[in-house]
Amino acid sequence: MAHKRDREATRARLLDCARVRFARDGYDGASVRDVAGDVGVDPALVFRYFGSKSQLFTEAMATSSEPVVLPDGPLDKLPAKLLRDLVFEDWAEYAGEHPLIAMLRSAGHEDMRDRVREQVCNGYLGVLKELADGNDDADLRTELFAAWLLGIGILRTAVGTPTLTKATEQDLMPHLATVGEALFGRPIPVPAED
């Protein structure tokens, strides 16, 4: 019985390390050898447990926490909460990035691209679209706003542009309100400065 528990624990550690590697380095940049090294096992063990790098990737991302974590609260406060969650929250499980941004690093991998699209379309866009109700082009407005939020996250973490990387929540909130109001046609409240 102890042998089975050790095997399960090793498998779980491999998935945890793979999740961080894929989040930080993307699918192409992460290697089975690196993941095995992080856990202190031979790369052959990774292939024995998972069969391939692709299967390791699929299982690591499937066992991760759900990327769409919509904040609770009034709908009109959702944009500010999403900015905070996507850009400023520390998601340690994904090397410090929001899981969706981490997943985008591997969007060239077809399975991950499909999963990202599903998460964005069925999660964020469905809820954000309610803010654009009454506009003939509500879908376009919603996708533009989501692209703006994700773009901020990507430039801050994946690209590391100097100004956005240094920007605080309070630096970005007035711009969020301006962009949100322009796209949704209604005021978007932002938290007051502390």
Image (cartoon, rainbow, N blue to C red):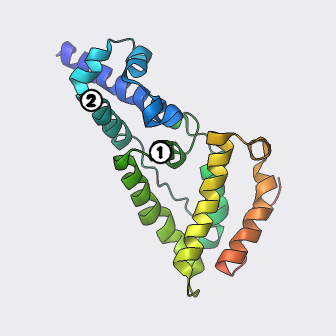
Other residues around mark 1 within 10 Å, as few (<14) / some (14–19) / many (≥20): many
Q: Residue at x 40, y 16 (%)?
A: 39
User: In the figure, residue 178 lies in which quadrant?
Assistant: bottom right
The secondary structure type at the circle numbered 1 is helix
In the rendered image, residue 167, in percent from the top left (x then y), is placed at: 79, 47
Looking at the image, how many numbered discs can be counted on the residues? 2
Q: Residue at x 47, y 45 (%)?
A: 103
In the rendered view, tell whether residue 125 sits above or below residue 92. Answer: below
In the rendered image, residue 115, in percent from the top left (x then y), is placed at: 38, 53
Q: Is residue 120 left or right of residue 32?
A: right
Frontmost residue, 147 versus 126: 147
Give the Cα distance between marks 1 and 2.
Answer: 19 Å
> Label 1: which residue?
103
In the picture as drawn, the residue positioned furthest to the left comes out as 1
Residue 173 visible within the image = yes
Q: Amino acid at mark 1?
A: Met
In the rendered view, tell whether residue 54 sits above or below residue 178. Answer: above
The secondary structure type at the circle numbered 2 is loop
> Label 2: which residue?
52
Quadrant position of the N terminus in the picture: top left
In the rendered view, tell whether residue 38 sits above or below residue 149. Answer: above
Q: Amino acid at mark 2?
A: Ser
In the rendered image, residue 141, in percent from the top left (x then y), is placed at: 59, 75
In the rendered image, residue 183, in percent from the top left (x then y), is placed at: 66, 75
Q: Is residue 103 left or right of residue 150?
A: left
